[in-house]
Amino acid sequence: MKHMTKAPTTAELNITREQMIRLLNEDLAGEYQAIIAYTVYSQVLKGAAYTDIARELEAHAGEELQHALKLAKQIDYLGGMPGVTPKPVITSSDPVTMLRADLENERETVGRYRERIRQAEAMGEFALSETLRAIIVQEQEHEIDLAAALGIDVPLPKTPAANNDRSPLKNGHTARRSAPATAKTNSP
Ligand SMILES: [Fe+2]
Ligand SMILES: [Fe+2]
């Protein structure tokens, strides 16, 4: 059963400040994951075919740090405490596995921010939605860079679970309390 095309209802968009803080902290954990992945992958990607994308991944690392700083600022503004734990990062020596992991994470991130922007607008938090809009522009550029390096089309964004009382994390991404030290890679 898929919810890929299901539009969010007003009830799903109307979340509390506390729920927004919790969701933004999950987003922040994803930004930390992205900083780590791009820092490491940009340095270990080997081979003439990957020289250009390795340089781009290094630039992505810096942009993800800026996203993390912006989210932490917004969480603090809302009265929350920014979290300190990244989502798990997959390690591999295979360039395609690394690039696919990055692309899958970007795809999930774009889906999450699409929802978050709507929720921020519904709350009347327009500075937050503007901040998220600026971030999502860069996430989509990251997707384009990765898809181009893999020679594939940019995949559709992953729609987070609609129920706000449940963690929107899924498909191998576990909630913080049970997060394993390492994540298994799915066979391509
Ligand atoms: Fe980011
Ligand atoms: Fe990104």
Image: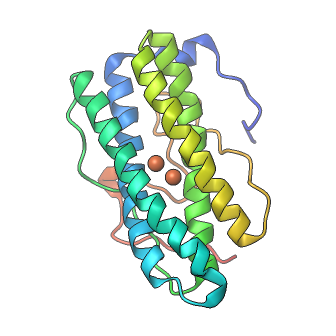
Say which quarter of the image contains residue 87. Answer: bottom left
Tell me which residue sits at (55%, 39%) in the image: 136
Q: Residue at x 39, y 69 (%)?
A: 39
In-image side of 126 versus 79 (left or right) = right
Q: Nearer the viewer, residue 186 or 91?
A: 91
Judged left or right of residue 80, residue 23 is right
Coordinates of residue 138 in the picture (x, y in percent): 54, 45
Q: Relative to residue 84, is residue 160 drawn left or right? A: right
**Residue 63: x %, y % from top left:** 43, 52
Q: Is residue 172 visible?
A: yes
Q: Residue 30: x, y in percent?
A: 42, 51
The total number of labels drawn is: 0
Residue drawn at (60%, 11%) of the image: 10
Q: Is residue 176 above or below residue 20?
A: below
Residue 71, how many percent across, how many down? 34, 36
> Which quarter of the figure has residue 103?
bottom right
Check the picture and name the quadrant holding the C terminus: bottom right
Q: Residue at x 34, y 37 (%)?
A: 70
- Determine whether 122 is above or below 188 in the image: above
